[in-house]
Structure formats: structure tokens, C-alpha cells
Amino acid sequence: MTQHDPRTVYLKDYQPPAYLVDEVKLTFRLAPETTRVLSEIRFRPNPDAASRDFFLHGEQLKLISASIDGTPVEPELVEGGLKLDAPDAAFTFAAEVEIDPEHNTALEGLYRSNGMYCTQCEAEGFRKITFYPDRPDVMAPFHVRVESDLPVLLSNGNPGERGDGFAEWHDPWPKPAYLFALVAGELVAHSDRFTTRSGREVELNLWVREADIDKCAFGMEALKKSMRWDEEVYGREYDLDVFNIVAVDDFNMGAMENKGLNIFNSSAVLASPETATDADFERIEAIIAHEYFHNWTGNRITCRDWFQLCLKEGLTVFRDQQFTGDMRSHAVKRIDDAMTLRAMQFREDNGPLAHPVRPESFVEINNFYTVTVYEKGAEIVGMLRRLVGEEGYRKALDLYFDRHDGQAVTIEDWLRAFEDATGRDLSQFGRWYSQAGTPRVHVTEDWADGRYTLTLRQETPATPGQPDKAPQVIPVAVGLLNPNGDEVVPTTVLELTEAEQSFHFETLSARPVPSLLRGFSAPVILKRQQSKEERAFLLAHDTDPFNKWEAGRDLARDGLMAMVLDGAGPDADYIDALGRGIADEGLDPAFRAQLLALPGEDELAQAIFETGRAPDPTAIFEAREALRRAVAERLGDVLGRLYETHQIDGPYSPEAEDAGRRALTNAALSLLSLTEGGDRARAQFRAADNMTQQIAALSALLSIEEGAAELKAFEDQWSHERLVMNKWFGLQVARATPERAAATAEALTRHSAFEWKNPNRFRAVFGALAGNAAGFHHPSGAGYRLLADWLLKLDPLNPQTTARMTQAFSTWKRYDETRQGLIRAELERIAGTEGLSRDTSEMVGRMLA
Ligand code: 0A1
Ligand code: ZN
């Protein structure tokens, strides 16, 4: 489908821009429905361009007037922009356009959210603000004047003149238009200062609505930590006099790294102990860091074109993961990241939406802000670091920053920095960027005369448009344990580069137990026959925390598969091994909480599908419930003891140590409620002075079909806090039984607080429905129908969020014929809807192809 759409854009068609921009001046006369934008853009012919065709992007703009060097011109308005006969020398193009922020429901370009004006320009939103070469390889300094009676008027860069009804801003750092931002509104600031290591004084502001001023302190601390960390770890300093962050309620994504003026979804920055959970705090810290780190990886060095998106996103995610590891625990963070990657990116890679980390074509670039580009992109950076070592990595990054500051570059430029800094040939490694699909690594072993041999064979399944795959460079970190549990070979990185390769370990006194893919050293799926005993052994003895956790996870998965496929009962050996793990006081409580997390329903569905059978979501749900109940029954004493001994006295702190204890006690609570009933959870709900404890108690109650009174009390307590109410909406759907999930979601859409045009609220309900696997895939098809109805309702208003949420259907080919038929019918109904957005039509087209 993608290949044949006439609107498809191809990487191979890249052409340098005909003209470059030396300077941009913009004046905004803000008015809800009739904002005027005046532009003066200094152009100069690009010596490296093949053509002199002058084209400016522009969409949904009313052109009032235009001129070249002061002489009025009448440009030819064409699809997606304008054309002009432009001089073959430097000139100034000026224009005045009118736009309508009030009716901009797509939340792209300039729009309104609760009466405030704000912008979102990545990827191609600037063209809805004025006519401009809206492509990332055109970089220029910006002068901006905002005219409005609103009290706070912000744009990128440093503040200039401020007077009655206007404010001026100057951003000296050349930037592409996607990093432009403007905010105007009745906002208040939580302010602070930061002194960079070279002594630059930076004013920091977090701008929010007055009612949210009590939810800013944590975000501000996270910002300061991020600024310090980037200096210490990457040698990168901030480069303006102010750094502004603004919280907005209506936002399609998490946050946006506009130069000097980050704009955040309020859910990604606002937090107080009463309203945000430990998970929210950690996520906020990571997103603040992510957007701040973009200042160097994304802004100072940007992407030549949107196919290079992973250049900034993969690297910046990798950097925020390192940061979170440094702030909290590397082991726990690595496990969390692996869980996310497997649950979301492997899912994408295994289905019709699979695409390379650097795609080669797209219809709508917004559809490629994916877990593949972001999370697999980050894994690639992590593998590079592992292959060249910490020092090589630092040298390569220094060279990259040095060489490309102020430029718009490509993955080739990025890899060349590594090659030049370390002398390593990365041509084969480059396949990680071009080949889609998750490599499978098959493992066989041999043991004879003190020599242990590991044979690794790699194979990557076909993905859309890529039937055949070449071998990739796969770093497989390995350690060997001897039978009494001592490590005889510490972690070594094997480099698998061929389709099949053997690695030998000599002079061992006994056949070792291998610990493979330590630290999840590559985003691959290991295929290996391994006994239950060996897994329990690794769970008890592995020195690598990731593989220790992994051993427990493998045991749980095997047990669950046997329950679903062979009607086996819960595996008592697994439960006993788990019991020893969670009782081990030498282990971090956060890690023990992770041990208690069973593989998700979707992960099991994929694993079953790979055995050649159609997964039954109801059976998977029931098996997980039965195992959870068996764990609660068999480990009730340990869980009860953990619950009591790991409670925290004293005031709430979102720091990792306390959060880990709460993660453990709340995992225990959820299990204990299955056998004990709801008293313990009700008591916790009543006593809770923070959201983590309150919502965990409510969740435990809803899971056992209790908690109606608490649900009501929660609503009464929090009806004025929209971020908390998103939790209230989502949790009910997430915890609904398979039979009730669609009906629960449907009932909530009739609730007076269901503001469906707000992406956070829409996602709260329908994201939860898609995440409730047994409910969404209930054989009645009610879940499919309800989601499709609402996607069709949202599409004309907000194509971006609609398109993203169609992914709920992406696994449809795994299921039985009846379910496939039901889903296909919904996808075809969506695809056949007249006036469907380009965004959504690309997504459903790819899923149906
Ligand atoms: N660059 C941002 C993500 C982002 C992308 C697109 C957006 O609107 C279409 C908004 C934000 C980041 O990586 O945080
Ligand atoms: Zn990013």
C-alpha cells in the first residue's frame, strides 16, 4: 500500500534545498480565529543544489500579501505550498498570512488549549503557520515578535524587548522550522537558576496554569539534574540565557524539544505526591531529561531529512536511559527497558507495521514516531557502545559533536564519526538501520574434553518489503557458571557476524551453565532449549541481574504456555524459585517487584503464535489469573511478610529506594487480595497520603471485582484534577473482566467528564481498552467495534492521535479466523470511510496489505 500511494516520499529521492535561509523575522498578531503572521525571510541560492525551483510549504494558510525585496508578487498557490520565480541571488521574501488557531483541533501548527496559544511544529507543522521551506536541512536564526494582551508571551531563544502588548525573542542558534515554538497565555512560573560549568547564568522557568503551581518542584529538580548530567557525562553545556518549559493539556505526544522553549503534555511534567504515582515521577524525570538532551542531540545537530529521525531520537532515548540508570538503578532500568522493547517494539517488528529503524519511504511522517525508531534506535546506540567500549564511545561522540555542530546530518555521518574515532569498520553494522525485523539467535552447545562450544545461528524473518535478510553484527554478552554457581568465565562479548558461528571456551573443569545475552546485549530473540532446572539455577546464581530476572521470566512463560496449550496446572517449582527470589533480602526491592511481574498477555499471545497456533486471549487471561492465584496461595506467608516489613514510615519521597519498596509491597498487595479479599487494600486506600498507594489499592480492589465505593470516593476526591481523572477512567477499563471491558469503556464515553477531543482523555479510555487484551479481543467483537467507531469520530479532528491508536489492531493476523474476520471488517470499514485522513489511511492500508 505504502509503495503505491502517490503521496509516498522516498529516502532515495532526497535533493538538497534550492535555497538556504540566512535569517527569519516573524511577527504574530494573535487573535483566536484570525491570527496574522508576518514573515521576512532572507534567502540565498544553495551552491550545492541541482535546481533553482523556489517552493515554500504552506497548508491551511490564507495568503494576504507577498513581496520580494519589497516588490509585491503574486505567487502561484499549489498543493501543499507556493511557487515563485525567484532571483538567482540573495533576496528577502516577505508575506502576511492569516490562520485560525481556535479551530485547529489537530494540535499541529498554532492552536489553542484552554485559552492559551501554543505550537507544535515537529514534524511538518510549521507550514501551517506561514510559508516556509519546512524541512529540517534548512536552518536559520529566528527573530520573533509576539503581539497580544495576554500576560505571558514566549518564543525560542533569548528574550528581547518587552512592552505593553508585545514581546520580542531572538534565537541566535540556526535551527530548522520544526523547532520553532510560541506560547501565549495566562500562566505563572515556577522559577529557578542554573550556573553552567563555564559560568553562564541560566534562568529556568516552568510555566503552568495557576492551579498547577504546586506540581512543578519535581520537574524543576529533574531539569537541573539533567543539565548537570549532560555536562558531566557528555561534556555538553546549555547555550542560552533562559530555558523555558510550558505545560499544556492538549498535546498529541509526550513533549517537544523546541529550542529554549520545551512544550510538555501536562501529564509528562506536572507531579505532586498526592496526584502522581512513582511511575509518573520516574517517567517525568526521564522525559524532562530527554527533551533537555535534545538540545545537543537534535537541535545543535539535527536531521538532514525525516528518514534520519532515529539519529536524534534513538540517541536521545539512549541518553535518557543512561541518565535514569545513573539516577536510580541500572539493573532495574535495563529490565524495564527490555520489557518495553519486547512488549511494544517486538510486537511492531513481528507484524504488518514492521519497518527499518531508518525507513525508506513514508506517506505521513507522523506515523513513524514509533517504538522502532525510538527504542530500537536506542538499542543500536547501546550496541555500538558495547562494541567500541566506553572510551571509544566517548571519543566518537566528541568527534560527532565537534564535526557536525550546526549541521543537519545523516546516519552515515553518525557512523563515520564512530569509524574515524575508533578505526572500526561499521559497514555491516549499518544493517541494523536498514533491515527491519527482530533477529532470532538459535543456540546449540557442545561439551567435550574440557572444551565448551557455543554455536550461534542468526536468522531474521521476512518483513513487509524485505523478504530476505543478511546477517547482522550481534554482540552477545556471555558469562559461564560452574555447577556450584561460581562464575568461571566473566562477561565476554561474542561478536556474531556470520549466519552461523562457533565460539570455544577451553580448559574448563566441568560442563558450565551459560548465561547468554547478559544485560540484554542485543535486541534479539534467543532460541534455546533449556531445562527448568537450569533456569532455576540461573535465577538463584546468575551474577548478571538482567539474566537472573530473565531466568525467572522464562520459567514463568514456559509454565504459562504449558497451562494454555497443554492444560497443565501452575508450575510449583517455578513458584518455589520465585518465592526464594522475592525473599532474598540481598536483592533490591524494585528488582524483586520485577521478579513478580508475569509476562504480559500480548507477549504470551505472540509466543503461542510462534509455535504455529492461534492464541486464545481468553485462555491466556485465565492462565495468568490461575497462576497469580497459585502464587498467592503458595507464597501467601512470604508476600504477607514482605507487605508488612517493607512499608514506609514518614513522608512520601519519589526517590528510587522508597519507590522500589512501594513497588514490592503493591505487587504483594495485588496478589494477596486474590486470596484474602479486599480488606487489606481497603485499609491501604483509606490510609493513603499519596497517589501510588491510593491507586494501587484501588487497582487491587477492582481486580477482584470489588471497590465500587472506593471508585466513587476517588472520583469525588479528584474530579477537579484532570490528570488524576485520566487514571480513574483508564483503570476501570484496564481492570474490567474480559466480558465487561468494552461495555465499561462505552459507559465511560457517556460520562460528563469524557472530553474526547483531549488526547490524554481519549487515550485513557481507548488505550486501556486496547491494553486489556482479553477484553479487547473478546469474541463478541464489541471491543473492535467500539474502538473503530471512536477512531472514525476522532479522525477528522485529530488524525495524528487517531492513526497512532489504530495500532491496537496491528496483531490481527495472529488470531483465529473469527477474530480475524471481525477485525478485518473494522479495518475495511475505516479504510473505506470517505475523507479519511492521510495519516489513518496509511496505517490501515499497511495493516490490510
Ligand atoms: N521530538 C519529540 C516527540 C514529538 C514528535 C512529534 C510531535 O508532534 C507531532 C510531538 C513530539 C520527542 O522526541 O520528545
Ligand atoms: Zn525525542
Image: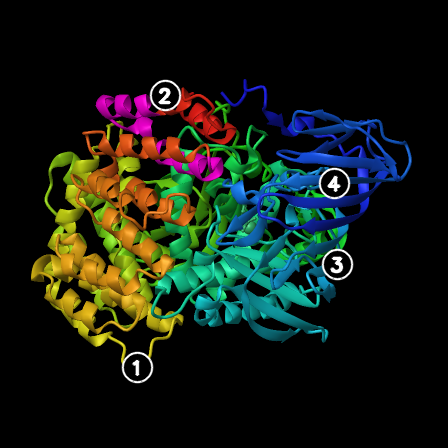
Using the image, determine if residue 641 lies above or below residue 603: below
**Which stretch is magenta?**
797-826
Tell me whether the residue at label 3 lies in contact with that at label 2, contact meaning CB atoms closer than 8 angstroms.
Answer: no
Using the image, determine if residue 741 lies above or below residue 781: below
Q: Earlier in the sequence, mark 1 or mark 2?
A: 1
Report the residue marked by disc 3.
170
Residue 594 part of the magenta-drawn span: no
Using the image, determine if residue 585 lies above or below residue 832: below
Alpha-carbon span between mark 3 and mark 2: 49 Å
The crowd level at tag 2 (other Cα within 10 Å; few <14, some 14-19, many 20+) is few
Q: Earlier in the sequence, mark 1 or mark 4?
A: 4
Left/right placement of residue 843 relative to residue 664 reads right
Which label sits on residue 96? 4
Tell me whether the residue at label 1 lies in contact with that at label 4, contact meaning CB atoms closer than 8 angstroms.
Answer: no
Quadrant including the C terminus = top left
Which element carries disc 4, helix, strand or loop? Answer: strand
Using the image, determine if residue 813 lies above or below residue 124: above
Left/right placement of residue 207 relative to residue 705 reads right
Which element carries disc 2, helix, strand or loop? Answer: helix
In this view, the mark in front (4 or 3): 4
Q: Amino acid at mark 4?
A: Glu
Total numbered labels: 4
Which element carries disc 1, helix, strand or loop? Answer: loop
In this view, the mark in front (2 or 4): 4
Q: Amino acid at mark 3?
A: His
Q: Earlier in the sequence, mark 4 or mark 3?
A: 4
Q: Residue at x 67, y 71 (%)?
A: 202
Between 574 and 809, the one lying in front of the other is 809
